[in-house]
Amino acid sequence: MKKSNSIFAVIDIGANAIRLEIVECHDDNKYTTLESLSQPIRLGKDTFLTNSITAESAHTALKILRNFRKKIREYGSVSTRIVATSAISDANNRLGFIDFIRQNCGFDIEVLENQQVSQLLVRAILEDIKQILPEPNSNLLVVDLGSGNVQVAFLHDQNILFYRTLKIGGLRLKQILREVEVESAEFYKTLRAFIHNNIDLLKATLPFERVDYFIASSSLMSDILALLATTHKIQPPCTVDMSLFNKMFERFKNATVDQIVSQFNIPLESADILLPTLTVYGYFLKIIQPRTIIFSTASLTEGVILNHISGITNIKDQVIAAAKTYGQKYNYDHLHAEQVARLSESIFMQTRKMLGLNKQDLIILLIAAYLHDIGRYVNDRDHHKHSEYLIAAASLPNLSSSRLARAALVARNHRQYAMKFNPKLLASLTNPDVIKIEKLTAILRLANALDRSHSQGITEVSVTHKKAQNQLVFKIKTQGNVALEKWAFNYARDLFQKITYLECTLVQEQAF
Amino acid sequence: MNGLEQYNRFEYFINRELSWLEFNYRVLEEAMDRSNPLFERLKFCAIFSSNLDEFFMVRVGGLKDQMEAGYRRPDASGLAPKEQIKAIADTAHQYVISQYQCYKRALIPALRNHGIEILNYSELAGNEQDLVEDFYHHKLYPVLTPMAYDPSHPMPLVTNKTLNFAVELIKDGEDRKFAVVQVPTVFPRLKQLPSRTGARFILLEEIMRKFLSSLFKGYRIKEAILFRITRNADFELDEEGAEDLLVTIAQKLAERKRGKIVRLELEHKVRDSWLLSRMVQEFSVKKYEIYEPLNPLDLTFLFSLVEMKGFPDLRYKPFEPRPVYIFGSDPFETIRKQDVFVQHPYDSFDPIVQIVQKAAEDRQVLAIKQILYRVSGDSPIVKALARAAENGKQVSVLVELKARFDEQSNITWARTLEKAGCHVVYGVIGFKTHAKVLLIVRNEDDGIRRYVHLGTGNYNDKTARLYTDSGIFTCVRDFGADVTDFFNMITGYSQPGHWRKLVVAPLNLRQHLIELMQNEINKSTPDNPGRIIAKMNSLVDTEIISMLYHASSNHVKVDLIVRGICCLRPGIKGVSENIRVHSIVGRFLEHSRAFYFRNGGDPRYFLSSADWMPRNLNRRIELMFPLESPESKRRLQELLDFNLRDTIKARVLHPDGKWIRIDKRRKQLFDAQEAFCEGTGQEATTREIVFQPKFEISAREN
């Protein structure tokens, strides 16, 4: 978290450019931009074409980063975060590149996962458009077109319910379709088919029909707005009528790169990836048919800055909202899931000190609690195993893939068998990690047992540690018959007892 | 040029070279003007000469290159390079004759009246002749190097702008010889003789002439002609291949010495001379490139004459720039409270020097960035920047090496800055950086604050006493952010961003100017006409001129204050009848570029480093910036108002391309520069400036 009036720098190593923002953070969670620099370098061209970053590009990147380091040093000792996205994460030699930069420039590059990118972008975009968004609680579809990836996020009440990362960024598409002559009619046809194919796959998972507002953002946004501004300047963030966009797109789609540069006054480095970018937007808009589009120029760097200033404030709510949406997709028993999650959180909060768990662990537990039964969608038999891979494959905001894998593991073990670990995952875990997973699993098993009948009969659980008796007493308030829960508790408590060396007992207190 | 094609007619434009010659004639008129103190008249006479030297080296040199390359395309006024060279020669010959008439008939007699004489050897007293002879034999003779030229010796290199004797030598039994002796530049050209009253001088070449035969023992001098050549010094830099701009510039400086000859000046009229025919052949000069009789050659020596001590009555009354009283001891505090407008030389240049000096020592200052184009030889700003770097500040300086004829001195102090630890950037490849901007980044109690100075003139403490320039100090956030981005762009750290306040050439300045003019047109009606007032050094760009014609055709009243070249032709019915062009040539060199757009009654004011010339709008990095504080706007309005009210030094351009002094009848006599010197500029001026469309005819003086 930032200090008052501290200086913070963020460098974003993107597919098409490296950017630096130096900001001054203020007490009111606001910031002032001191420097905003951008240098074009197509690292993505290397990665998307050859799967690796060339030596020439690495040296150019180093030169830019050294210049940026000089710039940062003008402000003395500055907290700096260097993030990289698809151009680095998709490169086979990313570790070598990261080491090369560290050795020669001293910068530690942090390669962001898709979910982080999505979360950071959405955060920046929401901040950017908050003054012009008519109904903040509505359903929003945010589509950020990067050079490497397209981030698609569906939001309700400002929480990300779904997000997807599509590998159809402008530069990547240009590289993928490089064999088709860029300025031929064939290129546009192939491009459109390729894009449609990718976006169509989303139709099954994203509730396009529920979208209230379509929000577009892109590093090329200023160029797009320049194209739109035929009669007057358009200052982002702004809403633009669909008809205006369509008119512009029709005018633009058959233009050659040279024409784009000369007629539309677009820089060359943007011109050749604008067509793929606009085609992606065009298709989204065709599906969604919004009356207006909200354009934002918010960027990843702004998301990083906002996170630095105020941290992630509603991470739990966001994750839960997304987990519920994911559960709905697999027809989960949402009442049971919510009851298990509620009881899990209650037990967690009352035992966390004893168990040495923290807030981050709670999120893993809650994901597992909400989604532990989604494997039933595949088959009731061994549903816990199905739940594991379905959770691991989910894209949930604010949750890294490793944490998601842990949640999947906790869910996998919610049934009363001996703990089973995915060997690949186990190899990546430290002993304390393994023990933490066992502890979370132990809580989930108790909570699940306490709604064994899926009838939400238990209204409250309080946990008391009787030290003299080495006993942990779970006192429950109930409404209705909880015989099955009592029975299940006796089986489910084994793991908890094994971990805590305490005897777990259940005491019922009538609610009425 | 949408809709502007109708103005693409030769008769609507004045040739830029001829317009420049007219400007130089206005300079000469100041030498002719008896109301100016005598030494100042001498200075104007010398400026006329040095201006003409540069004009021949650059402009005529460039045209000659074009002509020799077979380039025949006419300029906006319809003249092809060859025709321009001819027209230039016609006018230049005429004006040089006027200059020498003024020198001989007005200036020399006037000097003599004050006991100041420039004498020939024969006019010296006996003891003076002895002294001169002694000087020749002991000091001058050892440095003279006569160079003979015959079939076995190549023609010696005659250096640009030096004085030389061409000598025809005869010896019995030998073919006649051609020799060249350069008048050395290591001695002052003007040699002062001891005198109890007044001042007596002899020119170096006169001493040499007397003893010339001592250099050619055994030969007889049949004829000796003093001459001076001017070479083409207009070079193009191939920066793409230039690994080190510093080295490339140094090489080009050496090449300048060997440029083609564009002018031959002779001290006497020479006819049927073997020497002259040899020179014409060797120097490849055409008849129209020979200027004669010019005795003495090269009147720039008058600069050194007026440097002599004493004679206060022959100079302008001493003038001390006003201190910028609101600056106080803490300039940062002052700027935090309000923008500060400065107008040099009437306001002291010290605040600019002081703020850099203070920043160099200020513990809260993190970084200083500045563009230096032409600085003085012993610049306190350069010293302060070096000191700041030594004190651990991040100092970035963009040194524009390509500032013409200042390249050598730029290289020298750029290296000084580098040694002190400054981050020195040598210009932007392909562009000359002409913007004048200073940025100081300060870490204050309430956060980072950026202090900016933006101006129209170079950071040169010496010329700031002679040139009129304006600028602002501000710490308004958007200016700070823009200037930061601007430095990041020109130092190669970042691509251009989106500007909040600044307008930047070659990115958007041209477009922005056109939009401002279009806005005036849009808001203009016959009853409520739009209004543009633009002050600059030169107006050449045909698109901008066409836009001004377009504005005039749409009832917009346009006042232009153009010191130098003006290719716009005012007063053409239906095209430019609403345009009036003024020019002020006076004690101070008018240098500020300032603009006013009425904007339907909500005026917009700008200052800029850029003239409205293609090179400034297309090939230079320039800035235009708005004035936003009421006080800054008031000061700029006053500046423009005073310039337009001038009846003493102002001339008005007439449709025939001639500049005519203002008819003073029934008008209050008003000298804008004088008024600013006297501090009348402190009075509030808020009224709208009235447009006076009629051309006033008065006879050209002299």
Image (cartoon, helix red, strand yellow):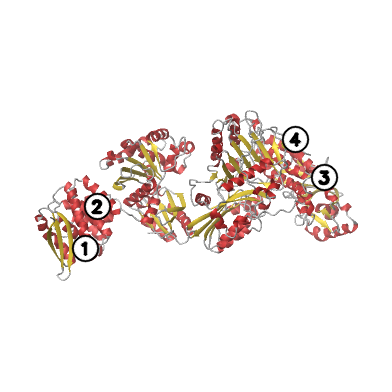
What is the distance, in whole Å, between disc 3 and disc 1 at their CAs? Answer: 107 Å
The subunit letter for the residue under badge 3 reads B
The subunit letter for the residue under badge 4 reads B
Q: Nearer the viewer, mark 3 or mark 1?
A: 1
Residue B106, labelled with which disc? Answer: 3
Q: Which residue is mark 2?
A: A392
Q: Which residue is mark 4?
A: B698
Q: Is residue A426 visible?
A: yes
Residue B604 screen position, x and y as percent: 56, 42
The local secondary structure at tag 4 comes to loop
- Frontmost residue, B369 versus B359: B359
Residue B361 screen position, x and y as percent: 56, 63
Above or below A100: residue B239: above
What's the amino acid at mark 1? Thr
- Classify mark 1: residues with Cα within 10 Å, few (<14), some (14-19) or many (20+): some
Q: Nearer the viewer, mark 4 or mark 3?
A: 4
Q: Are marks 3 and 2 in contact (CB under 8 Å)?
A: no
The subunit letter for the residue under badge 1 reads A
